Image (cartoon, rainbow, N blue to C red):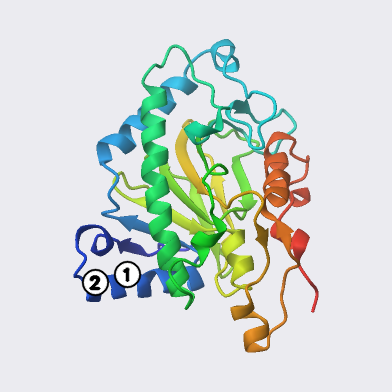
Amino acid sequence: MASFDIPTIDVSPFLISEEDGDGKKKVMEQIGEACVNYGFFQIENHGIPLGLLSSAMDLYKTFFACSDEDKLLVSPKPGSSIPAGYLKSPQNSAEKNEHFVFLPPSSGFNVYPNNLPHLKQVLEEMISRFTKLGMLLESIISECLGLPPNTLAKFNDDRSWDFLIGLHYFPATEAENNGKSAHEDGNCITFVYQDEVGGLQVHKDGQWIPIAPSKDKLVVNIGDIIQVLSNNKFKSATHRVVRQRGKSRYSYAFFYNLQGDKWVEPLPQFTEEIGESPKYRGFLFKEYAQLRVKNRTHPPTRPEDLIHITHYSISN
């Protein structure tokens, strides 16, 4: 296990002052380096109140403490591309967790537990805050790639494919401690807020780096879409969750995605314009997103059989 941690970046220059050009330049340099070297970083002074982050965590814990009968009352409605509501990992899954997915309110597919009347309001506020933060990070990452700041935003005509997921990982047993198998995220940007138990780890240089929990920081990682668009200039880092004996772990994550009908392929700035071959064939985002959802709802018995972005790799 590595003894060092991922970078922590203060993003306040982008939130509190239009004039702090030097501060913004420093933030961009730090994020660019983190995207090249780790694919992960933490941000502080991000603008989301600690009270709101804590309220969402407390509500998730309260929900997951409900009876299975009550939780199953908010199972996903049929018809949604991303199942919104409560799901538990199937018995044959290598991952041992339960989760609650919440979509943007305009989706019409969200379901709400009757015994937690404040959950809807808090999660809607969380989605609003995370969306604004995602738009900011998206612009910064575009510039870090040497692109105009609105480049990645052109892939987001609407936010209907975003989602917020609350997760409860069951305590580890003597036989196994896998909470979430090693994987990469299939989206643009992910924001994670974890409780004090920890367990999130990122893989780098053959080692697993534990990401220490912090009540006032958010973990950020770039996903497969950024990796594909940049033709591997920025990497979607492999990460996992390891459970602990005698302790439940709680976290929630916001997945900042693309509009479903957008075509994804390496941008010409990273291929033909610099004489490099594309490393991926093109695909519709919703096609890949639905394959990744199937990983979660109908997981294979072997983690190595999960669908990854290598599904679209080109052998050069």
User: Label 2's element?
Assistant: helix
The x and y percentages for residue 72 are: 60, 16
Q: Mark 1 points at which residue?
A: 27
The x and y percentages for residue 225 are: 60, 60
Q: How crowded is mark 1: few (under 14 residues within 10 Å), some or many (20 or more)?
A: some
**Is residue 216 in view?**
yes
- In which quadrant of the rendered view does residue 21 lie? bottom left
Query: What residue is shown at x 37% (from left), y 47% (from top)?
Result: 213
| 266 to the left or right of 202 | right
- List the single residue furthest toward the right: 315
**Is 211 situated above or below 293?**
below
Q: How far apart are marks 2 and 1 (CA)?
A: 6 Å
Q: How crowded is mark 2: few (under 14 residues within 10 Å), some or many (20 or more)?
A: some
- In which quadrant of the rendered view does residue 194 lie? top left
Q: In which quarter of the image is the C terminus?
A: bottom right
Q: Nearer the viewer, residue 302 or 64?
A: 64
Q: Name the residue under label 2.
A: 23
Q: Do the residues labelled 2 and 1 touch (CB within 8 Å)?
A: yes
Amino acid at circle 1 = Val
- List the single residue furthest toward the bottom: 275
**Is residue 3 in view?**
no
